[in-house]
Amino acid sequence: MATDSDTSRRIVVLGDMVRSRDRVERGRLADRLTDTLDRLNGQFADQVQAPLTMARGIDEISGVFRRPEAVFDMLVRLNLYVWPAFFRFSVVRGEVDVHRDSRDASKMDGPAFHKSAAAIESLKASGLLLHLDTGLCDPASEKLYSLLGTAHLKLLAQLKQGSIRVLKAYYQALPGQDTPTQDEVAARIGFKSRQAVSDALQRADYDFLVKIEDAMRDWARGLPC
């Protein structure tokens, strides 16, 4: 039987834009971020309790998930769609004691939010881009998850525009859905040939990125929450 403590726990996600004050054309970036959040909240609606939303202009976002396995998939797409801007993220499972069943993260509060905010400050100091704390397994395993996720997000942030354009076409498909063919992607984004798409995927190390995502999703799916 679930205890009150169990039922009050939520998976809180906070995002902090890296070097947000240095971003140019902030108005356009805000529009792109708004569109991106609307799109992803719709695609991942069955996984999200309180949709990801801007919490302080474009600098911060917050949201609450029902389960952890889709969190990284959503965050990867968020950083991909707002590139060259990108976020660092803290993912904390803990108690929410204010409006715990709300679908509006701005109305919710509790230790999980405070712990997640503190983790963001630690990420700023460490240079990492992901922190996970579920309290459900060995902390060393969560540290490995956080480091692997950071490696993935840093690889994504360092890509060139051509590879980003190709990846955006591929990541429109959610995990488990069919991805487009290289010919379809070339036609969709205006590349001259499928070989140009193939070259961009190789430069992005796309197969390796997907392997990381699969491993992280499988690991998170095994958590007892």
Image (cartoon, rainbow, N blue to C red):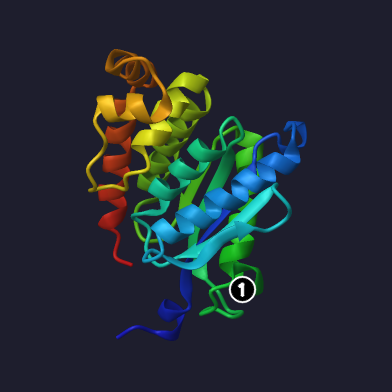
Q: Secondary structure at mark 1?
A: loop
Front-most of 180 and 154? Answer: 180
Q: Taking 125 as reference, is 203 left or right? A: left
| The N terminus, quarter of image | bottom left
Front-most of 161 and 91? Answer: 161
| The C terminus, quarter of image | bottom left
- Farthest right residue in view: 21
Instruction: Give the residue type that dot 1 points to.
Output: Met
Q: Taking 154 as reference, is 6 left or right? A: left
Residue found 28% across the figure and 18% down from its top: 194
Residue 109 falls in image quadrant:
bottom right
Front-most of 203 and 218? Answer: 203
Say which residue label 1 marks: 108
Provide residue 62's location: percent of width, then percent of height.
59, 58
Residue 168 visible somewhere in the drawing: yes
Q: Where 39 sits versus 203, above or below?
A: below
Provide residue 78's location: percent of width, then percent of height.
50, 44
